[in-house]
């Protein structure tokens, strides 16, 4: 076996081990902690999509909250206006379709520019959607938002069931299955010729164009794929949260998405997953400790940038590489 194979086998085994562990999570965690974990997993799906742009395409978006809100509001509006179709096997594809449309429009506008211009355009478009969600009160519920009812799932009704019972039962295993599929699909995408093309665009746009890569089109494809993941995360999160409001489309939440990715480490594929779950718990406990919880979040970001610029997973990878070099030196 080559070096690549010896690297992939441990990663595969780790994935299988984590998946088996997640299957037993409802029996190991209290209900509230399990709900937090589910929220973190939905953010992790979003983080995978966000990092397709940040790491693999070299584009930093400050507007992904709008794409997250698109998926979440699609669920809410389906329950509000089309209760007969409010089944999870119908709602999720419709949320993906809504995310596809919005991300295709946003991406078509944004990918014409790079660097700070791309980031500001994404931010501006997200604030347009935020304003629409607030102002269109008769449709979106305005600043009050929309309550998310429990959906039917593959013919089974959960009417009258408490949300925590729903979340610790069938929905949890549905969410874990979606998360596993999303992780594998994204790993395939970034390892495919398409993913390599995105990385070549990130590294040197001019050279990528010279070898025949249509740079703007590939960036648009990456934006749309990123939007689909983010919208899916929003749709799945809405069932966990039980309510959607315009704040998730605001620039503050978009900044939190960036923070999650930096916390976990955007240079490692699994980094955004770790960062999303850790951020969920960090924010909760910061809010419970003090009303100045944003100070704690900001302070941790400063420490992170100064001491662990590669994020938590990047720091572990760096440490492991040093230990390996030390062992090799000792062996010699």
Image (cartoon, grey):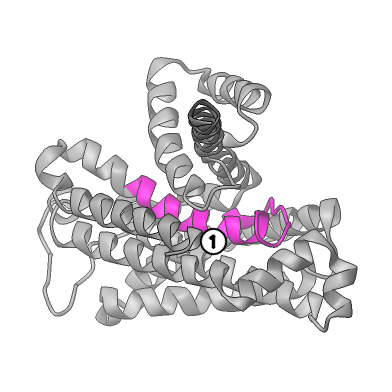
Q: 316 or 154, which is in the foreground?
A: 316
Q: Secondary structure at mark 1?
A: helix
The spot of residue 302 in percent (x, y) is 65, 23
Q: Residues within 10 Å of mark 1 (few under 14, many from 20)?
A: many
Visible residue check, residue 39: yes
Q: Which quadrant holds residue 109?
A: bottom right
Q: 67 or 131, which is in the foreground?
A: 67
Visible residue check, residue 86: no
From the viewer's perspective, tell me whether residue 223 is left or right of residue 171: right
263 over 233 or under it: above or below: above
Q: 178 or 331, which is in the foreground?
A: 331
From the viewer's perspective, tell me whether residue 10 is left or right of residue 263: left
The spot of residue 286 in percent (x, y) is 44, 22
Q: Which quadrant holds residue 117?
A: bottom right
Magenta residue check for 42: yes
From the viewer's perspective, tell me whether residue 330 is left or right of residue 213: left
The spot of residue 284 in percent (x, y) is 39, 30
The spot of residue 178 in percent (x, y) is 32, 66
Identify the residue under disc 1. Answer: 49
Tell me which residue sits at (52%, 38%) in the image. Answer: 317
Which quadrant: the N terminus? bottom left
83 over 35 or under it: above or below: below
* Range of residues picked out in magenta: 39-65
Magenta segment, principal secondary structure? helix
């Amino acid at each position: 076996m080559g070096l690549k194979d010896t690297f992939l086998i441990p990663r595969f085994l780790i994935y299988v081990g984590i998946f088996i562990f997640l299957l037993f999570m409802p029996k190991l965690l209290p209900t509230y902690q399990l709900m937090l974990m589910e929220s973190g997993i939905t953010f992790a799906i979003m983080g995978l999509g966000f990092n397709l742009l940040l790491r693999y395409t070299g584009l930093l978006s400050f507007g992904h909250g709008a794409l997250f809100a698109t998926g979440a509001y699609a669920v809410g509006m389906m329950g509000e206006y089309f209760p007969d179709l409010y089944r999870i096997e119908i709602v999720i594809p419709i949320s993906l379709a809504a995310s596809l449309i919005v991300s295709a429009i946003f991406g078509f506008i944004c990918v014409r520019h790079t660097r700070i211009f791309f980031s500001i355009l994404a931010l501006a478009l997200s604030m347009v959607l935020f304003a629409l969600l607030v102002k269109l009160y008769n449709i979106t519920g305005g600043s009050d938002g929309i309550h998310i009812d429990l959906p039917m799932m593959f013919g089974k009704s959960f009417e009258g069931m408490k949300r925590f019972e729903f979340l610790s039962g069938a929905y949890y295993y549905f969410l874990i299955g979606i998360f596993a599929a999303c992780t594998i699909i994204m790993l395939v995408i970034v390892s495919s010729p398409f993913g390599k093309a995105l990385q070549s665009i990130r590294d040197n746009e001019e050279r990528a164009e010279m070898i025949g890569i249509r740079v703007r089109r590939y960036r648009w494809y990456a934006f749309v794929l990123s939007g689909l993941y983010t919208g899916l995360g929003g749709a799945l999160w809405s069932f966990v949260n039980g309510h959607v409001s315009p704040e998730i489309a605001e620039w503050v939440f978009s900044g939190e998405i960036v923070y999650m990715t930096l916390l976990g480490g955007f240079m490692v594929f699994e980094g955004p997953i770790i960062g999303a779950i850790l951020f969920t718990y960090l924010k909760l406990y910061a809010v419970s400790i003090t009303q100045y919880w944003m100070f704690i979040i900001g302070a941790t970001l400063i420490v992170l940038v100064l001491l662990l610029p590669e994020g938590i997973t990047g720091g572990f990878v760096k440490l492991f590489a040093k230990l390996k070099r030390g062992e090799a030196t000792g062996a010699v």
